[in-house]
Amino acid sequence: MAEGTLTETIRKIVAKAEPYVPQVPKPKKKIPLQAKILWTSGCLVIYLVMGQTPLFGATAPEFDFLAFARVIFASAQGSLVELGIGPIVTGGLLMQLLRGSDILKFDFKNPAERGVFQTATKLVTYVVIVAESIVYVIAVYGPGISEPHVMYIMIGQMMGASIIVMFLDVLNKFFGVCLVQCLQVMVGLSAYFRSLVKWRLMVMSQTRCSGQTSCRVYLACS
């Protein structure tokens, strides 16, 4: 392969950065099913707790820019998982598109090549986390923040939480039952449908009450 190509450049960057990139070690022996379930449950509980932990300095914006994608990205507005799995999906999708269009040429049959690609995907995900955190905080919460240090704290919180989510995903991939992303989306879907059912029941209750009130008024007048 000729020197100077994008693939070769990525190989060089990965070779220099890999010693400094935090890695989750792969299990040396087969993990029992009970242990996998415990790992998956633990990762999911941590994610749910993060979803209930408010983001310091965050004030509810007038319009939720990601309302249409909250369920897909398993995110929660105003919490530590504000970005959800968005950076992970974006980084992985970007690398897959580059490989699928033959801009990046990696032989996945070769374990070493596959490892380089996975490490490069992690590096791209870090870049996406930093970029999305800065842009999101400035665009969504920036107008309501009067002190600059609060904005810096919010950006740091969002970056740290997104990195934890990325490690939860990798941890569950090696030690858990399935990808924690799937479970996060399932939890988001269940919460969405619960809220939809509650809203529907409330509307039916209000309609029934208004109907009974109208009948009483009619009977009283007659």
Image (cartoon, rainbow, N blue to C red):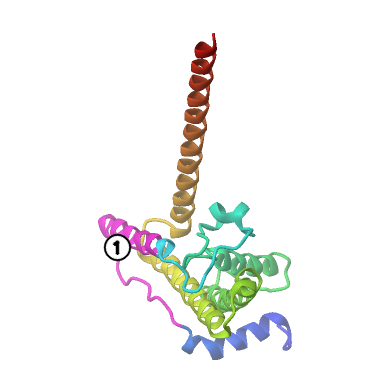
Give how far across and how far down residue 37 sits, in percent: 31, 56
Answer with the quarter of the image where residue 31 lies: bottom left
**Amino acid under label 1?**
Ile
Q: Is residue 32 magenta?
A: yes
Q: Is residue 168 above or below residue 193?
A: below
* Magenta residue span: 22-49
Give how far across and how far down residue 174 sits, in percent: 39, 66
Q: Is residue 215 magenta?
A: no
Give how far across and how far down residue 114 sits, in percent: 55, 72
Q: Which part of the image, by quadrant, shows the C terminus?
A: top right
Q: Nearer the viewer, residue 13 or 67?
A: 67
Q: Nearer the viewer, residue 187 or 65?
A: 65
User: Disc 1 on helix, strand or loop?
Assistant: loop
Seen as rendered, the residue at the extreme bottom is 16
Q: Is residue 198 above or below residue 191?
A: above
Answer with the quarter of the image where residue 123 lies: bottom right
**Residue displayed at 40% across by 75% down:** 24
> Does the magenta stretch mainly form a helix, a strand or a loop?
helix
Give how far across and how far down residue 184 sits, in percent: 45, 56
Answer with the quarter of the image where residue 147 lies: bottom right
Q: Which part of the image, by quadrant, shows the N terminus?
A: bottom right
For label 1, the residue is: 31
